[in-house]
Structures are given as structure tokens and as C-alpha cells.
Image (cartoon, coloured by chain):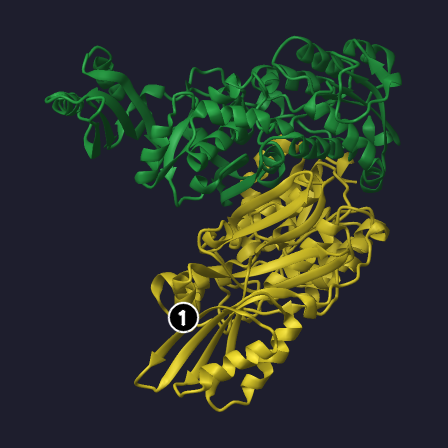
Chain colours: A green, B yellow
Amino acid sequence: MISNKKNINIAIIGLGQIGIYLYNELLKKKKEIEIKTGKKINIVAISAKNRNKKRRFKIDKKIFFSNPLKIIDKKKVDILFECIGKSDGISKKVVEYALKNKINVITPNKTLLAKHGDHLAKLAETNHVNLEFEASVAGGIPILRTIKEGLVTNKIKKVYGILNGTTNYILSEMENSNETLEKVLKKAQKNGYAEPGDAKLDLNGFDAFSKVRILSALAFNIKISKNNCIMEGIENIELKDIKIANQLNLRIKLLGISEIINNKLFETVHPCLVNKKSYIGNVNGVMNAVITEGRPVGETVLQGEGAGPGPTSSSLLSDLYSILKGNIKYPFGIPYNRRKNIQSFNNEDYANSLYLRFEVKDKPGVLSFITNRLAKYKISIKRIIQTPDKKKKTATIVIVTHKTSEKNSKNCLSIFKKNKNILKFPNLIRIYN
Amino acid sequence: MISNKKNINIAIIGLGQIGIYLYNELLKKKKEIEIKTGKKINIVAISAKNRNKKRRFKIDKKIFFSNPLKIIDKKKVDILFECIGKSDGISKKVVEYALKNKINVITPNKTLLAKHGDHLAKLAETNHVNLEFEASVAGGIPILRTIKEGLVTNKIKKVYGILNGTTNYILSEMENSNETLEKVLKKAQKNGYAEPGDAKLDLNGFDAFSKVRILSALAFNIKISKNNCIMEGIENIELKDIKIANQLNLRIKLLGISEIINNKLFETVHPCLVNKKSYIGNVNGVMNAVITEGRPVGETVLQGEGAGPGPTSSSLLSDLYSILKGNIKYPFGIPYNRRKNIQSFNNEDYANSLYLRFEVKDKPGVLSFITNRLAKYKISIKRIIQTPDKKKKTATIVIVTHKTSEKNSKNCLSIFKKNKNILKFPNLIRIYN
């Protein structure tokens, strides 16, 4: 038990961007941590794929292990940081093995938690150790701690926000610099806002979705859901959409949303058109923001840097501090067997106003074909903007609709795939009210 | 020790708006608290000035005590909520007596903490109990917990924000409804956003200032300062200022600011002109917002409802939860004797761009008198708006200056007191950059 010990042994597994920054922070803040917690920390083991890789800070090779599992066998470790990433493979093995050996685990690994969080939480509870993962959602923003502790007795019915800094940076930068997604993505990778060559899980919404799963479990005291959900990324957003949104006084944001609707769980990630003057419409660049709606507290907003080794390390150290204070906690706030399973809301009933952008041949009858089809499905139109491109003999038609369900819009739009005058299946962006 | 007990006895002292709401919440959430913490709570004693006052929820008169100090003598209390308010008198006596008797104390009382926080924290530490006061700053926003735990190892250099819901509501409502401060204040009192007949401490900035003192102590690991500071409220803000601000694309907000400048502490509360498009310019109504700047986490923003029994109760219960988890903590994050004393920044060196509104007789030479005086003090002018009132033969002159120090502006403006053509000592509002 941490509470009976003065000296605490720490291992760090994974020395990439995050791990190496954390390693350096721990060395720097040793003294301060001792003052605040009364515990002396010692880094007794580190491990990474490549011992000799060039790193931002120098490592102590005497404590380097090639096989992280051996650390657990050979060293007396009290707290282990898993900074490898990925939901399976060695990261999962290390975390499992550590928990089984009564070692507290801290990790920023959202995909591991979103996939195996229930299993790992149970393992931690059985072994009376902590599994902490503040850094897995929204980087430096202490949102998990806020839900688990700061808002602990509130009844939360909705959590949503901008949960991925990379895509938020890309959308902001496309608007600011008037450049395509591809160009801006390269810039993001160059500036360290996106992993080089591995941006797919950011772009397609998967990263944000893992965070939504974790937030739902904490906010609603439920098991992590495995439901099929609407998950869309920003891959199909074109500069044209950003410009048109601007004309409409709207801005595109990739939102993660988790909500209890009629006692059912609804989780989703997709691009939204939000009012340019709204709060969420002004969270730009790499910033993340999480909004919770609870009773009796009302709306609470947390905003901060969502990515990067600095903010992530801030969260990892807050977890360390919590463990050093001898604070044994349920990883998801309540005991494993008290967390409920919950029915999922039918995605097809999800209803929104829609922005639809058609690229069509500039011929008579095309607009009327589109509007007729919409009328047939009782999708009423709020606004139409048609802009011809005379050179190409094409036109862009943007239609903003009143609210309609996913099911209805899918059925309605299906026919546009087959029409020769419609050059592109319409780009659909939901409007967040 | 809480950690060895299954049944926890609670006393609530003070059954005003906050106390009675808390009492009801505790009864309602007993079961949920037991699931999350494993502890059974029992309210064993309540106390208030008036036993028979009409209250929002019914109380159990069998556990009512007229003298709160007797509760501590007669009942085995583990945790005491002090909801009386005021910095001295019975509230201070109860808290001291409880701590000395090894009873954990939870309080939303900011004036008590701002004045006697160091003394009370020492008392709590000596007696190995907790003194928790999350609800004392920014209502439902878990800002103290975030600084103490979520951002624990960050080096914070600045904390600022909108810390008083009443004045923020008044300023927003003056702008929205085009009504004077007096009228809007009455509306606020009617709607429960301001204490009836007792709004002075909100209006003059004292309430926000107490919160600044508490935030400084936590953010910078220092003793609560007793420095003389610039503390101005919104009493002198007129509808005219709000309208002119609007024309300048600015909005008036009462900001509390605490900052380390050259290793010295600078604390202040005063109205600021902020950009209407900025984040802080869009925190309206009863909302509070606190912004921290720290390393390595960067900027963190927390926003939520800053007042009212619901949000306050949310924070009080988060403190209860923390104590029930057996988490013995230093009230200000680090041991009493490790908290530093810090020199204070010289207020006279505080520098800002200024908004100056003069009401003058509409006579030749008046403007040149003003501008000459400003020039003499090297206060350069960014903008002038002069609006004549032909009927009254007066004019309003608004001058926006470049940055100048408090000392310089005070010296410069002093002469305007004596000039017969200047009808009103200029209304000065600092512009927040």
C-alpha cells in the first residue's frame, strides 16, 4: 500500500514524445512532489522499443529494460506509467500484468481504455490498486477528475465538446489560410500537432470517439458501450464547405457527443455546423473544450490544450499525485458491479437540420429534381444557395433543411447516387442547434 | 479517522438558502454517496438562528440546536458544514471549535477563508482533519480542486476571471435591457441573483476580492496576502459607459486578477473593458469563468454557474465526497509551513490603456485643456469621441489612451477635480489587453 511507504518506485514504459517528456518532468519535480505528498519518488526502470533512438532528453541507460514485462518481475515497482499507445499488444499486456501484480497504473492511452477499460478496471479493483487515465481525454484539461470528483454528486445528462486537437487545428487553419485539408494536414504534422504519417485515427473521428466512450462511462455510471454509432470524421470536408459555412455565419467543428435520451445512451462523433458566435464556435486551433450539463450544477465548461506532451504530462502527474496521496479509487468512480449496462438509442431516430452540398450539371430541371425528392420525404427546405460555375457548366447547390431523422435523410439521399446530373453524392453536415 | 468508520455523522450549521438546499440534497443522495464511497452518512444535528423560519424544505426539529457550539460538545460529529457566512463572529467560532475537536469542516464562506484561512488551515493540519472550501470560489466550478489536484504539478503564473455572478448579471442585463444599475439591481434581487438589501459587498468588488485572495494562495503556494490592493466595484458604471463601450466593440466586465510579476504578487479587482469578441467578453449573466495560465499545461478555462444553492451545493458535496474517501489533505495544497510569504507588486506601477469619460460644459478650450494636461503627463491618446448635448449645453468626451501607469494617471487626473468646466471627475475604466 502506497500510504504506508515513504519511497515510491516508478517505471515508465514507452519513451516517445509523451514518455520522454514525462520522464524529464518527474526528475525536475521530484522535490515539489515530496513537499506536496510526503513521498519520495524514484524512477527505477524505463523501457522503450529502441534504446538508442535520438530523444529530446537524455535517459539513464542503467535502468533501461528492453522487455517491459521483465521490469515487473525484477523490480519492486509501485506505480507504472504506460506510454506506448495502441489498444492491444504489448501495451495491454503490460497494464494487465502490472495490475495483477498490484502495481498502480497511469496511462494516457484512450484506445486501450475505450476498448478494454471495463476489464482493466475490474482487474484494478480486484487487486486494490488504482488505474488512472486523466490524460486519455482532452489532454491537460482535468475533465475526468472533474466528473469523478468535482461534480461527483450531480446527475449528468449530457457531455459534449471538441475532443480532438488535430482536427480542430486543421479546420481552423483551413479557414484562416484558405488552404486544402491535405496542405494543412502536412503543416500540422510539421508543427507536431499531428503524428507524422499516422493521422487517420484523428481524421476519421476514431480518436474523438474513444474519448466519448470513456466520458459516457464516467458521466453516466455505465459500462463502456460497444454500440454501433454514427462516427464520421473530417476527411470529406472541403475548403468549399468551410467558405460556404462562413457565408452562413456558421463554422465547422468536429464534435463528440454523449447524451442520455429517454433513458437510452446516444453517442456520436461527426462534423457539426455551429454558430460562429457561439462558445463552441470560438474554440479554435489545438484547443479542446468539454461541456457537461448536470443537475444541480447547471452547465460547466472546461477548455484547455488538448494535445502535446506538456498538457498530457500535466494530467499524468495529477494522476500520480492522486495515487501518492493514498487515494484508492474506483477507476470509473463507482464499483465495477454497480456500473449499469444501458440500452442504446436508435441512431436512425437522430434528427438534425442538415447542410447538403450538391455539385451538379448546370442544366434545367436539376434543382427541381432535387427539391422534389426532398419534398417526397417531407424534408422541408430552410435555405437554398445556387452558385453556377460557367466555365465548367456546373453549379454548386447548397440546401439547408429543417430537422429530419437520419433514417429519412439516408433514404431520401440514396437516389442521388444514381443520377447522372448529380456529379457528387451530396456532402452532408449536420447543424448543431 | 474517517477511513476506519462506516457511519459518518454530519452537522449543518446555518439553514439559509445554501444550508437548507444542502440539507435536502444530503437526504436525497444518501444512497448514491454510500455506493460511491462505502460510507453511510447521517445528519445528526442542524442549527440556525431561527428555528421556526419558513424554509424551502422541511427540517427535522428533533435534531435542531439553537447553539451550534453545543452540537460539538453533545454529539459525535465527523463532518461539519458551516453555512452561516461572514468572516467573524459565530461562524469563525464554530469552525475553530470544530477543528480543535478534530471535526472535518466544509464551508462555502469566502470571507472567512480570505481573512482567517491561514490560521484555520494551520488548525486543521495540527488536528489532522480536513478544511475544505471548494464552494467559496466560483460556485459550482471545481476550480480549487482543479488547481490543487488536476493541475497540481504545474507552475501557475496567473489566475483571473469573472468571479462574481451578481455583478456579471447586472452588467449583462444593463446592456440587454437598457436600464440603469439601480433598476437592474432590484431585478437581480427579485430573481434571487443578489441578496436582498445586502448587495454592497458584491457591487464594490469585495466578494470577488476575497476569492482572488483564496485563488492566489492556492495557485502560487503562498500565505494569504494582506496587501493593499486596487479594489474597485461596478457602483460607478453608468448605462452611458455601457453604450459607449458597445460602440467601441468593447464590453465591461468586473475582473479579478492575480498574477506573479517579477516574483511579486499582484492582486486586483476592477471593471475592465474587454473585446466583445473575446472569450471573457462572452461570459454573460450569472456565469463565472476562471482562467489559469500554467506550465506545462498552457491556458485552462473553467466556466459555470457561479452562484445559487444548486451550484454551491454541488461543490459542498464534492468536498464531502473527498473527505469520505479518507483523503487527508492540506487545505491549501501544501503544508502550512511550506507556504511562502511573498512581496507585493507596487500598485502604482500597474499600467493599462484607459477609457476616460468626461462630462464637461460645451465651451471652447475645454477639450484642449484636457488634452494638454494628458500631454503634460505623456499620456498619449488613441481615440477621442466627443458628443454634445445641445439642450444642456454640455458634452461627453470619451478618451481612450495608450498604456500608462496608475501613478501617472492619478497625478494627471487630479487637476480635473478643481476645474469648473469639468462637471464630473472622469469615469475611468481600465482596458484589458
Can residue A159 be seen in the rendering of this structure?
A: no
**Which residue is depicted at the point 78% across and 57% down?**
B223
Q: Secondary structure at mark 1?
A: helix
Task: Report whether B261 appears left or right of B64.
Answer: right
In the image, residue B412 sits, relative to residue A365, either above or below, namely: below
Q: Is residue B427 above or below residue B419?
A: above
Q: Residue furthest bottom?
A: B420
Considering depth in this image, is A359 or A24 the residue closer to the camera?
A359
Q: Position of residue B16 (x, y in %)?
A: 55, 60
- Position in image of residue A199 (x %, y %): 53, 19
Res B25 visible = yes
x then y, percent, for residue B231: 62, 68
Q: Quadrant of residue A347?
A: top left
* Above or below for B403 versus B215: below
Q: State which quadrant residue A20 falls in.
A: top right
Which residue is under mark 1? B239
User: Is B384 on the left-hand or right-hand side of B29?
Assistant: left
Count neighbours of disc 1 (C-alpha within 10 A) and say few if under 14, some if 14 to 19, many if 20 or more: some
At label 1, the amino acid type is: Leu
Q: Look at 45% across and 63% down and name the residue there.
A: B171
Q: Position of residue B428 (x, y in %)?
A: 53, 72
- The residue lying furthest to the left in this view is A364
Among the 4 quarters of the image, the one containing residue A74? top right
| Left or right of B428, for residue A58 | right
| Quarter of the image with the C terminus of chain A in it | top left
| Chain ID, mark 1 | B
In front here: B33 or A427? A427
Taking depth in this image into account, of A374 and A261 the one nearest to the observer is A374
